Image (cartoon, grey):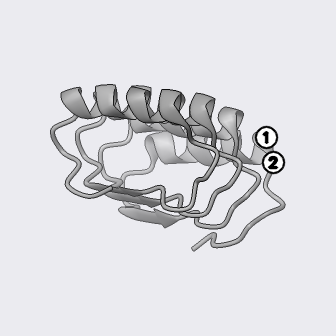
Amino acid sequence: DLFGCTGIGDEGWKALAEGLKINQALTSINLSGCCGIGYKGCKALAECLKFNQTLTNINLSDCRGIGDKGCKALAEGLKINQALTSIDIWGCRRIGDEGWKALAEGLKINQALTSI
């Protein structure tokens, strides 16, 4: 549970994502309130989603650094990942129309997600 880890920067997110790429045990990760995650963190997380097939739940609620670019990056990862069943992005207030459009495009391809 990494709830509220506001001190994690871009390099920390990249390192975490690299670990998640090869981890085959973790099924859920709570990153809610981690305001330091932005585009670069989302891009790293999206890359890990292309490889990780055991993670079923990601909680990114109230990660206020996530905007349109970050949401677009996540959507690209969701197009490939077929293990994730739930992603929580409640309270990510910087996501606008462009981010939501990208997410919708990702959902057209992803058939595993059952909860947003």
Q: Position of residue 96 (x, y in %)?
A: 55, 37
Residue 50 seen from this side: no
* Pointer 1 local density, CA inside 10 Å: few below 14, some 14–19, many at least 20: few
Q: Is residue 17 rendered to the left or right of residue 6?
A: left
Q: Residue at x 79, y 40 (%)?
A: 11
Q: Is residue 100 rendered to the left or right of residue 4?
A: left
The amino acid beneath tag 2 is Gly
> In the image, which disc is placed on residue 40?
none
**SS at circle 1:** helix
Q: CA distance from mark 2 to mark 1?
A: 6 Å
Depth check, mark 2 against mark 1: the one in front is: 2
Q: Residue at x 56, y 61 (%)?
A: 91
Question: Pointer 2: what residue?
Answer: 9
14 shown above or below 90: above
Q: Position of residue 82 (x, y in %)?
A: 23, 39
- Answer whether labels 2 and 1 touch (C-beta < 8 Å): yes
Q: Which quadrant is the C terminus positioned in?
A: bottom left
Q: Position of residue 3 (x, y in %)?
A: 63, 73
Question: Pointer 1: what residue?
Answer: 11
The amino acid beneath tag 1 is Glu
